[in-house]
Image (spheres, rainbow, N blue to C red):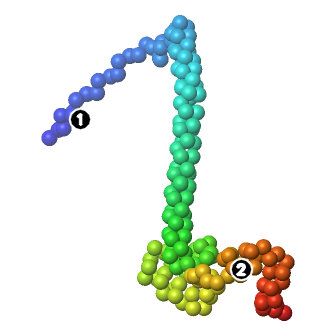
Amino acid sequence: MENPVFSQPATPAPAVPPDAGPRAPDADETVRVRSELEQLKTKLSEFEKQQLPEAERVRRELSELTAQRDAAAEELKQRKRDDAVKALATGQRFNDPEYLDFLLARRNIDPGDADRTEPFLREFRATNPRFFNVELKSGSGSRPDVRANHPLASGGGASAIAAMLADAPEIL
């Protein structure tokens, strides 16, 4: 059995005339194509000059704004911590809030965590009482008596001062 595809005789290729190679463009078409190419190059360079600096400016602004946002968030976080430390220091009568902040940061204690700050401050107060203010009530002082029967009130002058000094305790 013969294969019908292979059994057919091959058709000869049409004869190609010797001058039928690629067609050479005429001079007017070459000039027109080159002029369009130059126009496209000019438009592309103008577009790049306009768009690339604009995109770079937007990228720079975005990075600056991101940095500002991060700095503002960090500042807000620090201010909240400072306020919490100051409130804790005031409530516990701690006289140096910056040192209290240092102590809490060193021990990784959050100033708002009462479960950890209270025991720490009780222990610290026991070992370092000088950092805590003591509540004082006013008592007798060294100011002279201003009643009418006092020697200075009646105009005693130098003799009244001498009398007061005579009653004063000695300082060694």
- Of residue 50 and residue 96, the one placed in the foreground of this image is 96
Q: Position of residue 109 (x, y in %)?
A: 51, 78
Vertical arrangement, residue 75 with respect to residue 172, above or below: above
Locate residue 129: give its quadrant. Answer: bottom right
Name the disc covering residue 150, or none. Answer: 2
Q: Amino acid at mark 2?
A: His
In-image side of 171 versus 102 (left or right): right
- Quarter holding the N terminus is top left
Sequence-wise first label, 1 or 2: 1
Q: Amino acid at mark 1?
A: Phe
In-image side of 86 versus 168 (left or right): left
Instruction: Tell me which residue sits at (64%, 84%) in the image.
Output: 140
Determine whether the residue tagged by mark 2 lies in a helix, strand or loop: loop
Q: Nearer the viewer, mark 1 or mark 2?
A: 2
Q: Position of residue 148 (x, y in %)?
A: 68, 76
- The residue singled out by tag 1 in the image is 6
